[in-house]
Image: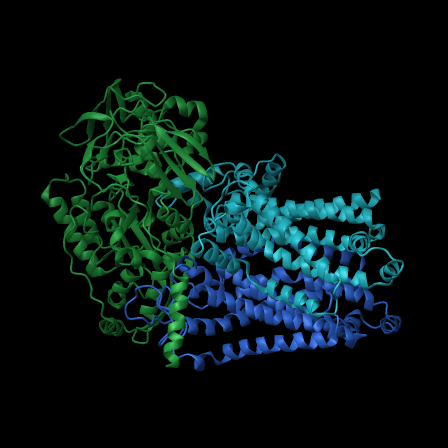
Chain colours: A green, B blue, C cyan
Amino acid sequence: MRRLAWLLALGALAAACAVPLDPPPSGAPAGDEPPRSGGVLRLGDAEDPRYLDPARGYDVVSWSFEQMLFNTLVEYDQGTNIVPGLVETWTTSPDGRHLSFRLRHDVVFSTGRPFTAADVKFSLERLLKPSIHSQGAEFFHGLEGATDYIAGAAKEVRGIRVPAPDRVEFDLIGIDPLFLHKLAMPFAAVVDREAVERFGDDDFNAHPVGTGAFVLQEWVYGQRLRLARNPRYFRAGRPYLDAVEATIGVSPQLAWLKYQRGELDVATIPPAEYHRVLADPRYRPLLISRTTLRTNYLGLNCEVAPFDRVAVRQAMNLAINKQRLLELADGQGAIANSILPPDMPGAGPVAGYPHDPEAARLKLGEAGLADGFETTLWAYRDPEALRPAQSIQEDLHLIGVTVNLKPVDFPALIEAVRHPGTVSLFLLGWEADFPDPSNFLTVLLHSRSRDTNNNTFYANPEVDHLLDEAEPLLVNDPRRFRLFHEAEVLVMRDAPWVPLLHPAGSAVRHPRVRDLELHPLRPSRVEGVWLAW
Amino acid sequence: MALTGLGSARRSRRFLAAGVVLVGALTLVALAAPWLTAYDPDAIVVALYRGPLGPGGAHPLGTDTLGRDVWARLAYGARTSLFVGALAMAISLLIGTAVGLVAGYFGGLVDAALMWVVDLVLTMPSLLLLIVLATILPPSILTIPLVIGIIGWTTFARTVRGEVLTLRERDYVQAARALGAANARIIVRHLLPGVLPGVVVLAALGMSGAIVVDAGLSYLGLGVPLPTPSWGRMVSDSQTYIAVAPWLVFAPGLSIALAVVGFNLIGHGLIDLVERRQA
Amino acid sequence: MTGYVVRRVLRAITTLLGTTLIIFVLVRVVPADPAVSIAGPKADPETLAMIRKDLGLDDPLVVQYGRYLGRLARGDFGRSYMSGRRVAEVIADRLPATALLATTSLALGFLAGLVVGIVTAARRGSAIDVAVLLGTLVGLSIPTFWLGNILIYEFSYRLHLLPLGGYGGDWRLDSHLLLPAATLGIGEFFFYARFVHTNVGGTLASDYIRTARAKGVPPGRLYFMHALRNALIPIVTLLGLDIAALMSGVVLTETVFNWPGLGRLAVQAVFSLDVPLVSGTVLFSAVLVLFANLVVDLLYGVIDPRVQRG
C-alpha cells in the first residue's frame, strides 16, 4: 500500500511537471486551393547564417539563404534530376569535354541590370580566386586554364568562354560526367559583378545581389534577417511569399515553443519531444521528413594497428549495436549496412554485417587479440553526436575493447584525421554533394584520396581499378553503376568503415504552410512555398 | 581580503557540524558507491531506448538520455567531484601558500613582482582562461584539476602574504633573524605554522570553489572525459530534456549545491574558531 | 597624489602588456591548424598552404607577436575565422547584450543585497542574523547554470510566464531580460547582502555609533549617513573586483539562456578554434577588468589617503 502511495505521489508530481504538447492553431483544412500570394514566412535560427556569399557558404543554413538570393545555371527538380535554371538549353560535345549553354533572355539582377554570360564567367572566376579561400574551388579545377589562373599565371580562365552575351561555353581537361551537378552547386551561383566591385569581396557577404526570388532587405546581426520578394524575378508569379523573416538567437527549444504557440512556421522537433510528437495524431499532417543522402560511419584507420588487420575491422562491424544507435536518434533514419545511402542513384543491396558480439569476439581471437585492446575514438564535440559515441564505447567494452573518447571540435577533427598515424578510430558522416556513387566511393575510399577525404587510408588496388574504370563513363551507361557496385562490395568485405546510420531530416510545419518539401541534397526551396492564411 | 566570521563560537560550531555532516555523507556515498547501486555508471541498461525513464522500479532516479542508471552516475560522480576538487585545491594551496610566504617575507622587489603576477592572473577573466587552457591540454582527471589549481591560487597567496606581513614583525621572528637563521628555516619553522589556520579555512572554501568551477567546466563540455560521470556534464547533457525529464537536471545540480554548501559551512564555521585559537 | 596615480597607471599598463603576451602565447599554441578553420572540412592541402601563407602563420613567433601588438595599437583585432567579419565589429555587435545583462544583474543584485543587508544589519545576534548568514551561504553555493535551467523550467515551460531565452534587445524586464538577469543577479544579491550585513552590522556595533544613538540621532539618518559611509569603501572596492567575477558569471548565464553576448561568443569562438575572436574577446574582457580596477584603486586612493603609501 505504501509503495502505491509513493508511486501515486510521484505520478502526481510527474503530471504536475508535465508540459503541454499542443500543435499550433490551425485554420481551414487543406484542400485543393490554388497557391495564394502574400504573407511572411517566419523562421527561427540559433545563429546568424555564416555566409550569404555563395562562394563561401558550405553549410545547410548558408545554402538555404543563398538559394533564396541567387540562381545557378542548372538546378535540381524535386529529386536529383538536372533541370534548367538560368539557362534555356545546353549541348555537350561527343567527347564530353565541351559544354555550351544558351542563357535565358528574361533574367535581370535585383538591381535591374540584365544578366549576361560575362556575369557567369565573373562568378566562376571569383570562386577560383585564391583570396576568396573558397571550399568550392576544387570542383572546378577540371576547367582548362583553371590551375594557371589560380597560380597567377593567367588573368582569366581560358576554359570559360563567352562567345555571345547569351552564350557561355566550358572546356574541360577531361571528360567529367558530373560537371552539370557541379554547376548545380550553390558555389556556382551567379553573382552581380557590379555589386562585388562596389562592396569588395569581403563585404559582399553583407550586401549580396543576385538574380534570386528574394532580396536582402535587412540583416541585424544576432537578431533578425529579412528577405523580401524580388519583383524582378524571372519566374512569373514567384515567389508567392511577400517576405521571409528569420529571427536569430532562437535555440531549438525556444523555436519549438514558439512553433507550438504559432509564432514560427517551421521547426525541428527536439529529440526530447520526438516520441511524444510522433505518437500524437494531431501532428501527423504537419510532419515533413525525407532521408538524406548521408551516411554516418565509424572510420577505422587501416594503417594503424590493430585496425590494419581485416579480422579486427570485421569484429568492429559485428560488435556494434546499430539498432540502439537508431533508437538514440529517435528512429529518424535507417540503419546503414553499406557505404552508399539507399536513395543514391546506383546504390544496390550489399550484404552487411549482423550485430553479433559473440562472432566479434571470435574474430578478435582469430587476430590474436582475444584479450582485447585499447584505442581512442575521436568524435565531434556536440552532445547529440557524443551519445552514439558513448553507445559505441559501451558496445566495444562488451567485447573487451577499451575505448577512450576524445571529443574535439569539427575543424580539429577534420584536420587530425587527415594526418596518417594520428587517429585510429573516428566518428564522421559524409553527405553527398551530388547524386553519384563516385562522390562517396572515389572521394572517400580511393587510395589517391588519402590526402583529402580518405581518412581511413584504405588502399585496395582492385577497388582503385574499378573506380578508375567507372569514373569517365556516362551516367546512363549501365557499366558505370555496376562497376561502382562491385567496388562497394569489395570495400564492405575489407571493412575500413562501420557504416552506422543514414539519418533522416525531419521538421514540422505550421498548418498554414503549403508546398514545403525537403530535398535530399539541398535545403528546401522557398520560392514555391505559399501560406494559406 | 579578510573573511569575516559568524560572530559567535557556538554558531560557528553549529555551522561546522552541519558542514561536516554534509561532506561526510558525500564522502560516504563516494566511497561506498559500488555497494549503493547494482549498476555500472557507464553501462547502458535499458533494453529498448525510448527516451529517459522516470524514477521508480529498478531505477531509483530513472535512466538518462543514453539509458544509463542515474543514481549510479550520481554516486560515482561524487568520486569525480571530490577528487577533482581536492586535487585542484591542493595545487592552489601549494602554489598560493608558497607565493604568499615568499612575497610576504622577502618584501621589496620580490613582493612587487609576485603581486604583479597575482594581478595579472586576476585580471584575466578566469572562466575564459580556463576554457582556453582546457582546450590546449588534453582533458583528463589529472589535467582538469591542474588547470583549475593554476588559476585559483591567488586567494591563498594574498591571504597568506597578508598574514606573513603581520607575523614577521613578531618578536620570535625578529629574534630568529637576528640570530642569523637561514631564511628557509624561518619561513618553514616560524611563519608557516602561523599562516596554517588561515590556510585551512581557505582550503575548505577552496574545495567548494573548485567543485563549482569544475561543474561549470563540465557543463560547458570541458571537464573530465566521457564517460566518467561528472555532475556538471550531467546537467548539460540533459538540459534539452528538461521539459520531459526534469529530474535529470535537478538531481546533479542539487548534488553540486549540497557539496558546495557543505564545504562552505565548514569553511565559514572554521573562521571564528581558528581566529580564537590564534588569539 | 600624482606619484600614486602615475604608479597605478604604469602598473595597469604593464599588466595589460603581460595580458596580451599571455593571450598571444596561449592562442598560438592551440592545437588545430587555423587554416582548416577557414577552409573547412573538404579543403585540399594546396588551399590550406595558401591560407597559411596569406595569414603569415609560418613566421617566427616573436615576429608574429610584434605584428600582433602593432595591430592592436591600431584597433585591428583581426578577422574572425567563423564569419570573416572584423573582430572589433563582432565584439561591438555583441557588447550591448552583455552590457545590458551585466548591468541589470549587478543593479538588481547590488540594490537588493544592499537593502537586505542594511535592514538585517540592525538585528545582529538574532535568528535573522543566522538566517541571513545561512541563507547567503546556501544561495552562493547554487551553481549559476543549474539555477538558470530551473528558472527556465518553472517560469517558461510550466507557467508560460516568460520567454524561453533569446534576446529582445530592450530594457523591459518582462521581456527576455528578466530570467537571465535574475539568474546572474541572485548570485550578486547573496554576495552583497552578506557583505553589507556583516560590515554595516559591525560598524553599527561600534562605539561611536552607539554614542551617536545615545545622543538621540534618529535611526534612519544613522544608518545612511554614518554606518553606510564607513562601509562604503570596502563595498566600492568589492564592486571593482566583482567585474571580473561578473565576466565569468556572464559566460555561463549567456550559454544557458542563449543570450547573444560576449560570453557565449567567447565560448563558441574557443570551440571553433577561431583564434582572432578568442584573443579579441578575452583581451577585451581583461581590458574592462583592468580599467574598472584602476578606477576603483584611484577612487580608493582619494577616499583613503593611507593607501597611497602602499
| Residue B158 shows in the view | no
Instruction: Residue C218: tell me if it is visible.
Output: yes
Position of residue A49 measured from the top left corner of the image (x, y, whole percent)? 40, 40
Which is nearer the eye, C15 or A471? C15
In percent of width and height, residue B197 lies at 73, 73
Left or right: residue A529 versus residue B254 is left
Q: Is residue B79 above or below residue C46?
A: below
Q: Quadrant of the N terminus of chain A?
A: bottom left
Decide if residue A356 is on the left or right side of residue C71. left
| A473 relative to A318, above or below | above
Locate the C terminus of chain A by quadrant: top left
Does residue A132 appear left or right of residue A516 in this picture? right
- Judging depth in this view, the residue of C242 and A200 nearest the camera is C242
Q: Report which quarter residue A354 is drawn in.
A: bottom left
**Image position, residue A131 (x, y; %):** 42, 33
Residue A245: which quarter of the image? top left
User: Taking A43 as reference, is A233 above or below it?
Assistant: above
Q: Residue at x 26, y 17 (%)?
A: A165
